[in-house]
Amino acid sequence: MSVRHTEGLLHGFLALRTLEGKSLADGELTQVAEGDRVRNHLIFHFKDGSLYDETAIFSQSAKFRLWSDHAIQKGPSFKHPMETSIDVSTGQVMVRYTDDDGKEQTISERLTLPADVANGLLFTLVRHIQPSVPQTIVSQVAMTPKPRLVDLIILPKGEEPFSSGAIKHKAMHYVVKVKIGGITGLLASLLGKQPADMQIWVLGGEAPAFVKFEGPLYNGGPIWRVELAAPAGFP
């Protein structure tokens, strides 16, 4: 995907909730430039002690390119504790997880990864989409837990109003569909196991900003909502 704005300096506060509004976790999204690369870090600390922690390293010379991604999910909010890593230059993908019997398993595979693989970058990339483009497609390594390449098809659905205090805004609403290729994708559709769509809202203008996300945080997970949160507790 083409770079429209330079990334590399960001610190945002996030709230993770159910669709009914129940608070599940407090989170942060940070970006720090390290030479010609950017470190993107997303973390959620759950009320029940669970943790979601993902760090993606990418470059942005004309087009975005992911170099590595490392993610940890653990605690009672997740069906299977899991740690994953992707080294794009070598294609090496590692998955450590706990199976249904409570046994630790490790999968290590070398995949041929396309240049547009986007693990850990969805919240970043969507801010660089031209709303007039009818469809944007990027790749993602889905951990099922066996690593599998899928396509993310990002479709604009139109602007929707929202407010920040007394200030009125409009956000572009995107739907993100997961496309599983081949016979596996056909079977998933027939068996009702097609991954749920994700919804993302982005404030446009000269400085596009993430507004809201609704979708699963992990493969097969429930639909949760991620929104911006305001710091509190000042004296």
Image: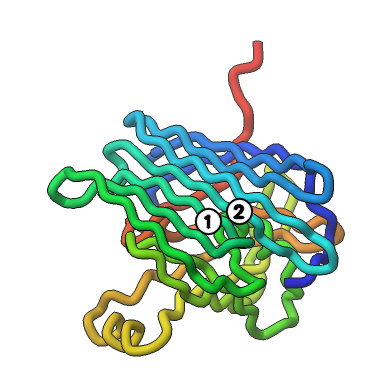
Q: Nearer the viewer, residue 225 or 128?
A: 128
Sort mark 1 into few (<14), some (14-19) or many (20+) by Cα contacts within 10 Å.
Answer: many
Which quadrant would the C terminus be assigned to in this image?
top right
Q: Earlier in the sequence, mark 1 or mark 2?
A: 2
Mark 1 lies on residue: 86
Colour scheme used in the picture? rainbow
Report the side of 87 relative to 108 (left or right). Answer: right
Residue 154 lies, in percent from the top left, at 58, 75
| Residue found at the very far top of the displayed protein | 235
Q: Secondary structure at mark 2?
A: strand
Q: Quadrant of the N terminus?
A: bottom right
Residue 118 vertical position relative to residue 52 in the rendered view, above or below? below
Identity of the amino acid at label 2?
Ser
Left or right of 101 in this view: 146? right
The picture quadrant where one finds residue 169 is bottom right
The residue tagged with tag 1: helix, strand or loop? strand
Residue at the spot x=31%, y=42% of the render? 77
Closer-to-camera residue (212/36): 36
Q: Give the residue type at disc 1.
A: Ile
Which residue corresponds to the image point at 52% horizontal and 68% vertical from the top-left? 140
- State if disc 2 and disc 1 touch (CB < 8 Å): yes
Residue 157 visible in the picture: no
Residue 65: image quadrant is: bottom right
Mark 1 to mark 2: distance in Å? 5 Å
Residue at the spot x=63%, y=34% of the render? 230
Label 2 crowd (10 A; few <14 / some 14-19 / many >=20): many
Residue at the outermost left position: 101
Task: State the residue position of label 2.
Answer: 68
Which residue occupies 48% across, 38% down? 44
Instruction: Residue 88: give x, y in percent of width and height.
Output: 60, 61
- Who is closer to the viewer here, 162 or 172? 172
